[in-house]
Image: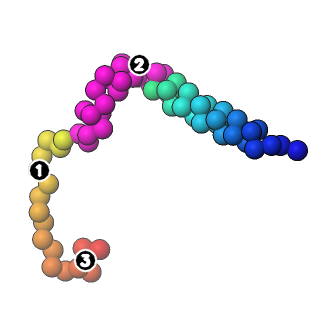
Amino acid sequence: MFGSYAFEMLALVVAVGGLVAVIAEIVVKDPSALAEIVTDVRAMAQPAQRAHVASNVSNSNFRKAA
């Protein structure tokens, strides 16, 4: 009924459709973010730095900590 070529084309269509959906969502929500993603990939991939340093709280009571 369907050859392997049809399944390959279906997979390609689904992959391209997903990529188009992601790009469309970025453009709709924040158009300037697309230019930032394209120009500076390394900065976009790094998590945002926290303003405060995480405190090292020690709790020896493991039942309460969980």
Q: How is the image coloured?
A: rainbow
Disc 3 versus disc 1: distance between alpha carbons? 24 Å
Secondary structure at numbered mark 2: helix
Q: Nearer the viewer, residue 18 or 31?
A: 18
Disc 2 versus disc 1: distance between alpha carbons? 32 Å
Residue type at mark 2?
A: Pro
Image vertical order of residue 20 relative to residue 51, above or below: above
Q: Earlier in the sequence, mark 2 or mark 1?
A: 2
Residue type at mark 1?
A: Val
Q: Main secondary structure of the magenta part?
A: helix
For the C terminus, give its image quadrant.
bottom left
**Residue 53: mark in rendering:** 1
**Residue 40: mark in rendering:** none
Residue 38 magenta-drawn?
Answer: yes
Residue type at mark 3?
A: Lys
Q: Nearer the viewer, mark 3 or mark 2?
A: 2
Find out whether the residues at labels 3 and 2 contact each other: C-beta distance under 8 Å.
Answer: no
Q: Residues within 10 Å of mark 1 (few under 14, many from 20)?
A: few
| Position in image of residue 15 (x %, y %) | 59, 36
Q: Nearer the viewer, residue 63 or 48?
A: 48
Residue 66 magenta-drawn?
Answer: no
| Position in image of residue 25 (x %, y %) | 50, 27
Disc 3 versus disc 2: distance between alpha carbons? 46 Å
Q: Provide the residue designation for mark 2.
A: 31
Q: Provide the residue designation for mark 3.
A: 64
Region rendered in magenta: 27-48
